[in-house]
Image (cartoon, helix red, strand yellow):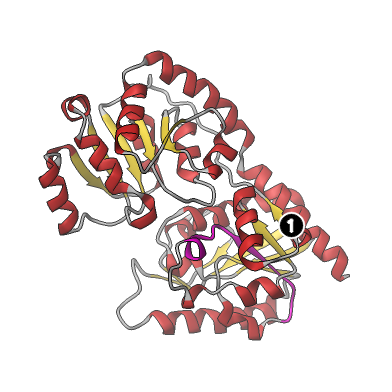
Amino acid sequence: MIKVLFESSIFLHQNVGGISKYVSELNKNLFKNNVSSKIFSPISINYYLDDKDNNSINYIKFSKIPKFCRKLFFFINNFLTYIYIKIYKPDILHFSYYNKSFLKYLRIPYVLTIYDLIYEKMKLPEKEFEKKELLNNAKHIICISEQTRRDLIRYYRLDKKKTSVVYLGTNDEKKKKTKKKLEKYILYVGSRKRYKNFKNFVLAFSKSKFLIKNYKIICFGGGNFLKKEIDNFENLGVKSNISYVKGDDLKLSNLYYKASLYVSLSIYEGFGLTLLEAMKSKCPVVCSNIPVFKEIYKNSCEYVNSKNINDIKKGIERVLKSKKKQKSLLLNSKKIVKKFTWELCAFKTAQIYKNIYNYEK
C-alpha cells in the first residue's frame, strides 16, 4: 500500500475553507484506493482536524495563531514534519499549500495542488506563497480545473504532461426528514474582499425595490463586517437587510438548505466549491459568467456579468420571480452534483500517486 503524507501548512492558514476541506476529504477517501494517508499538523487552527474519521495527527489546536507566533508555529510544524517523515517513511508527500521553506529538507517525491492563479492574475505580492521553486521540483502537479491548468501553463511555461486536472467534489446529500421550506434570504459565503466582488452584489441588491422589500442577505464566514462595509450598507439603505453569521459546516449546510438563492460574483476562481455545495442542498445559483464556472457548472446556474450592476440585479430577480426558472436550474444542477464527488477526486488522485510510485520504484 502506498503511504502518502499531507503536510500542515493549510491547517495553520485556515480555520475552515475550501482548500483545507479538499485535503481533509481527500485524506478520508484515499484508503478506498489502496493508499494509506495521513495529515500531519502538530499545531493547527483548523476545524476539520476535529473530525474523528479523519486520519490526522494534531497535538495542539488554537482558534487563531497568537500574535508574533506565526513564524514560530510554521517552523515547529516543518521541523516536526521532517522528523515524522524519518519515522513514518511515506512514499510521497502531498503539499497542502505553498510551503517552499520545507523543500530543502525533502528527500522524497512530492505532489503539489494548484488551486488558482489569483496572485498572478491580479499582480498581488506573493512572497509568502511563491510557487516557482515548488512547481519546478514537483513530481506532478494537480490542477482543480482546466481553467486553472491553462492559467498555470500560461504563467509558468510548464510541460502539460506534468499536470493533471482533478476536480473537487461534495459528499452525497443526506435526505432531510422535513419538507424543504425556503426562507426569504439570499446566501453569500466566504471572503468579501477584492476579486470576490461582494460590493457589486450589495449595490445591485440596493437598486431593486423588489429585493429590498422581499429578501435579506445572509453572509456566512469571511469575518465580521468592517466599519466601512457597514457604512456602505447604510449609505445604500440596505443595512437592515444584511446580516453576518459564523459557524461550522453543519450551520452552513442548513443555511444552504433554507436559502432562496445562492450568489457568487467572483471575477476569478479556481473551481468555486461553494456553488457545488449550494446545488447539493437544492439551492438555485446566480453566479458570474467567468470561464471556470461555465466549464464546471454548465447550464445549472444563472450567469450574469459581475461588472454590470443592472445585469446582476436582473439576473437575481429573474430567478427569484420565476418558479419555472428555479425548477429548471435545480434539475440541471442535480446532474452536476452527481459528477463531482470526493470519492472520484480521491480515485483520480490515487492514480497519480500510483504512477509516481511505480516510476520511482
Depth check: give the residue in front, 299 or 326. 299
- Please, is residue 117 above or below residue 287 in the view? below
Residue identified by numbered label 1: 35
Depth check: give the residue in front, 168 or 248. 168
Residue 332 position, x and y percent, is: 54, 24
Judged left or right of residue 147, residue 246 is left
At horizontal 70% and vertical 65% (from top left) the residue drawn is 4
Residue 52 position, x and y percent, is: 51, 54
Residue 156 position, x and y percent, is: 64, 67
Mark 1 secondary-structure assignment: strand
Judged left or right of residue 339, residue 271 is left
For the N terminus, which image quadrant? Answer: bottom right
Q: Is residue 115 rendered magenta in the image?
A: yes
At horizontal 30% and vertical 33% (from top left) the residue drawn is 310
Depth check: give the residue in front, 105 or 239. 239
Rendered image quadrant of residue 80: bottom right
The residue stretch that appears in magenta: 107-121
- Please, is residue 322 above or below residue 221 in the view? above
- Please, is residue 134 above or below residue 358 in the view? below
Depth check: give the residue in front, 18 or 195. 195
At horizontal 47% and vertical 76% (from top left) the residue drawn is 128
Q: Is residue 197 visible?
A: yes
At horizontal 31% and vertical 18% (from top left) the residue drawn is 321
Q: Is residue 260 visible?
A: no
Residue type of the residue flagged with mark 1 = Val
Q: Is residue 116 rendered magenta in the image?
A: yes
Residue 166 position, x and y percent, is: 66, 50
Disc 1 crowd rating (10 Å Cα; few below 14, some 14-19, many 20+) is many
